[in-house]
Image (cartoon, rainbow, N blue to C red):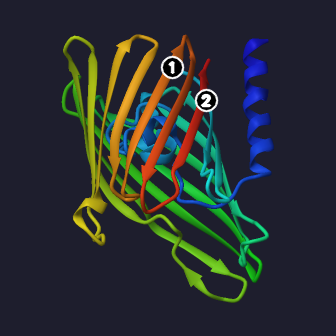
Amino acid sequence: MKKIIFIWLIIGLFIITSCFASFSPMILNARAGGLGEAYVALSDDWGSLIYNPAGLSFVSKKTLGFNHLEMPESFTRVEFLGGVLPLGSFYLGLGLSTKSASSEELLFPFSENAFQLSLATNVMPNLSIGVTGYLYMTNLDTGSAQGFGVDLGAIYLVNSNLSLGIALYNPISFLKWNTGTVESVERKDVVIGTSLKLNFIVPLKIVADISLLEKPTFMNRVHIGSEINPLPILAIRGGYNGAKEGLTLGLGLNFANFNLDYALLYTKNLTNQHIISLSASF
């Protein structure tokens, strides 16, 4: 009964908050957000739906998660609902994100829904690969568009403490407007990353990602973060998000199979972002 109540709670939150959603650069997982979105090699939970589909192969239980992003100084709120289902040697992921911008002060209202289907497997004991397909539906006050995209990813475990990852975001994609215009989708990148786990007085993770595509500055290509666990139920995170030119802080609480995560992106160039994730494994 508790599982059923939790599932309906997450779905209800998604439906309610999506009614007030508005467009922004997406951070769709609070744990990754607290780590500066340096998540390509660490992806070992439902956040892999966003950052590296290969990470689905590290999710051993059925998992359902909800993420909410809010920018209190603007119109912006973004929602994501996703789940992971282990199927023997394969791992299936499903997700739905909504984002929109509508306000009396906004001249060009915008909305976009993205549905995704992910699949991952272990091709070797220490190598996982994954793929995600997206279906986009976009609307402006002047027209609408439909399109698709594909993410590819891989994670290689060097040993129990060190992993390497790579993710190709939308190497193949298109968005076709009813006016006949065709363009690429918003997120296109190639990112490599590493994750290092250390055990001193408390467990510590250090993660770093770098974009291989040209950016305005080198620091725009860099994402770094760290996570410490002073208590089994508590995680403290911090990092730097180069793409959004901001510092990040985060907290995580783990109660048995339930996780609550919060992250703050602080930046001078964009409105600060608050990200909250809630997930459960069954």
The picture quadrant where one finds residue 38 is: top left
User: Residue at 58% across / 60% down in the picture?
Assistant: 24
Tell me the amino acid under the disc marked 2.
Answer: Leu
Give whichever of 156, 73 is nearer the camera. Answer: 73
Left or right, residue 255 beside residue 76: left
Quadrant where the C terminus sits is top right
Query: Left or right: 201 with respect to 7?
Result: left
Counting from the top left corner in percent of width and height, residue 99 is at 67, 58
Q: Marks 1 and 2: in contact by CB < 8 Å? A: no
Judge whether 3 appears above or below 185 on screen.
above
Quadrant (top left, top right, bottom left, bottom right) of the N terminus: top right
Along the horizontal axis of the image, is 170 left or right of 129?
A: right
Residue 73 at x, y percent in the picture: 61, 55
Q: Secondary structure at mark 1?
A: strand
> Can residue 5 be seen here?
yes
Q: Nearer the viewer, residue 24 or 136?
A: 24
Please state which amino acid type lies under the numbered disc 1: Leu
Give the vertical position of 203 relative to 15 (above or below). Answer: above
- Residue 164 seen in render: no
What residue would you read off at disc 2?
278
x 66%, y 89%: residue: 180
Which residue in the structure is indicated by mark 1? 253
- Crowding near the residue tagged with mark 1, few <14, some 14–19, many ≥20 C-alpha atoms within 10 Å: some
Q: Return the disc, 2 or 1, that comes first in the chain's sequence.
A: 1
Q: Position of residue 193 (x, y in %)?
A: 27, 46
Q: Is residue 13 left or right of residue 51?
A: right
